[in-house]
Image: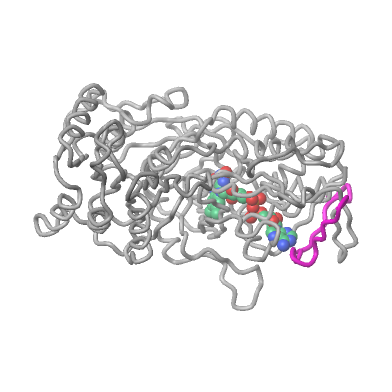
Amino acid sequence: MDTLIIGQGLAGSALAWNCHWQGDRVKLLAAENLPTASSVAAGLVMPIYGHKYSIIDRFKQKLELAEGFFRHVEQHLNTDILFRPLRILRRFRDAEDRRYFLQERYESVAGWVQLQLGGDGQATGFVMSGWKLNVPSYLAQTRQYFQNRGQFLAAELEIATDVVPCFDQVQLPRLGLVADRLFFCQGAVGSQQWNPWFPGVPDHPLRGEILQISTECVCELSGAAVSSGGWDAVVDEHWLVPVEGVAGHFLVGATYDRERVTIDAEGSAGGWDGTTASGQKELSTSAQRLLFQGGMGAGQHMVVSHRAGIRAGTRRRQVLAAYHREQRRLGILNGLGSHGTLLAPAAAAELLRQFDGGCGQVREQTEPVVSGTVRRRSGLTEKAQTIVRRAVRAGDWVLDATAGNGHDTVFLARLAGPERVLAVDLQPAAIEKTGLLLAQEGLAGVGLVTADHADELERLSVADAGVWCGRFGAVMLNLGYLPGGDHVLVTKAETTVRALRAACQLLRAGGVLTVLCYRGHAGGPEEYSAVREEAGRQQQCQVDEIAAGTGNPTAPVLFVFRRNATVRE
Ligand SMILES: Cc1cc2nc3c(=O)[nH]c(=O)nc-3n(C[C@H](O)[C@H](O)[C@H](O)COP(=O)(O)OP(=O)(O)OC[C@H]3O[C@@H](n4cnc5c(N)ncnc54)[C@H](O)[C@@H]3O)c2cc1C
């Protein structure tokens, strides 16, 4: 089979190797001067990341796949080790951070981390197992391998005019190429151009900056832990990782920005390379802190290089590994987000599994399949919790504005700590049930309030001269009636709108309000329309509307209000 692959970042390279190993005649095409994410990626793989200790779903399976893949590439290239283990130190910021990690995360990652104890026997942090891909070497050697076989072409395609899919082949007339199938692996930068086959992918690009620094420290990544403390890298919300083969050089990353998400092509007149003075300052400060935390001294460092790239993120945090619905010879591998090293091998294998190579047909898919890395479509209740879990930071207050049977209250109490949770409901029965459930779960300290949620939230937003405004990381609202309760007692459009306006006042920048609308009961569609209109009027928040995906007009809908960055904290 002749397979064309557009793009040679982490996605295109993983796909090229997989196709090659299964006997395809691969042709890799990539533009040379585009600012790709892979060219700046540090190649870091960690089971836990970010300031909230996010955990990668099914990390073990993904890691096994990635490790097998990179070992196979190393053997094929007969090269030095490209993918190596790392011991990564993470120190707790403060007592609240330690409590959050130990209570919320430790159990599910215990196999990957080793707690570090201080003199008083309290955990001061942990060392976790991680991995690092030497990305520049992997990409350069992959390119060289295919180039030596006449299977690499440096070219920038105008997708709308250059790619012509036909019944039994795909043609690229301008380049005189024909293939049985073609895969787009263009990352985020490719989406700056129009791809009519997969428009709007990826839909959540994130710009990131990274520094290479040099220090007096003589650490060099060698496969074994290099620092005197027994770790190779240090992380908190940023990371500091040694550069392979260059003693005293580290990569420090990365920033996140979803506002300015275009970078100009290299060498374009007056073009912007994506780096900013504020990004450099943020990363330099972190470098200083991380060097100190890692016991590598508080000495000066010099910035050797400062670069930026755009991560191909998706709103649903899903890797897109799918075929076009009508043009079955066109496929896409995109949306690797911040985890291209870990996710690309599994996603590439998944994409090829969907294609029945013998007859050139794609097996029926009901929706774009996402590599095993991504959670399947879940219920909206679970989705709301996932969104809240990602938004809440240690020390945030959270509010369940419709306590109901208490499930969201319990979820919030586990997430933020019971003493940081308020739960409100008009029905005494609901407050009672919530209290019982909390007691069963051993969660004491939640503030339970029997009141109309609009009244209570408005009261809170003006109480104590507005001191509560901007202090909440999440507010959850479940509209409709109390499950198992009196169906006459339903939330009403007028009070719901008042409640959500007040809730937006309470949120801090980046905080979220989730509003789950049920439309199947009397008054439900009107309440949904009122929320929708309010969403359209909102100046303080960005609002997403997520449907249950059934196409049924009475199916539930989730609104997610995210507070803009201009709020006073
Ligand atoms: C600062 C930063 C740090 C990061 N650190 C890490 C990390 O430590 N670990 C990790 O796993 N991930 C990291 N990432 C994320 C990682 O970079 C991405 O997940 C990954 O690189 C995406 O790969 P890709 O192949 O999808 O896209 P890209 O790397 O952007 O590649 C796109 C390819 O498509 C080509 N292309 C696009 N359009 C065309 C066209 N029209 N014609 C021809 N060719 C075209 C480009 O030339 C390029 O070859 C980081 C990202 C950033 C920005």
Q: Quadrant of the N terminus?
A: top right
In the image, residue 328 sits, relative to residue 200, either above or below, namely: above
Q: Quadrant of residue 413?
A: top left
In the image, residue 4 sits, relative to residue 86, either above or below, namely: below
**Residue at the extreme left:** 464
Q: Residue at x 24, y 38 (%)?
A: 403
Q: Residue at x 81, y 45 (%)?
A: 145
Residue 60 x %, y %:
55, 27
Residue closest to the eye, 437 or 521: 521
Residue 295 x %, y %:
38, 39
Residue 32 visible in the current orientation? no
Residue closest to the eye, 116 or 472: 472
Residue closest to the eye, 143 or 18: 18
Q: In the image, is residue 102 part of the stretch drawn in magenta?
A: no
Q: Quadrant of the C terminus?
A: bottom left
**Left or right: 517 as drawn, with respect to 81:** left
Residue 515 visible in the current orientation? yes
Q: How is the image coloured?
A: one colour
Give the residues in magenta: 147-169
Q: Quadrant of residue 484?
A: top left
Residue closest to the eye, 137 or 263: 263
Q: Quadrant of residue 199?
A: bottom right
Residue 446 x %, y %:
18, 35
In the image, residue 484 sits, relative to residue 461, either above or below, namely: above
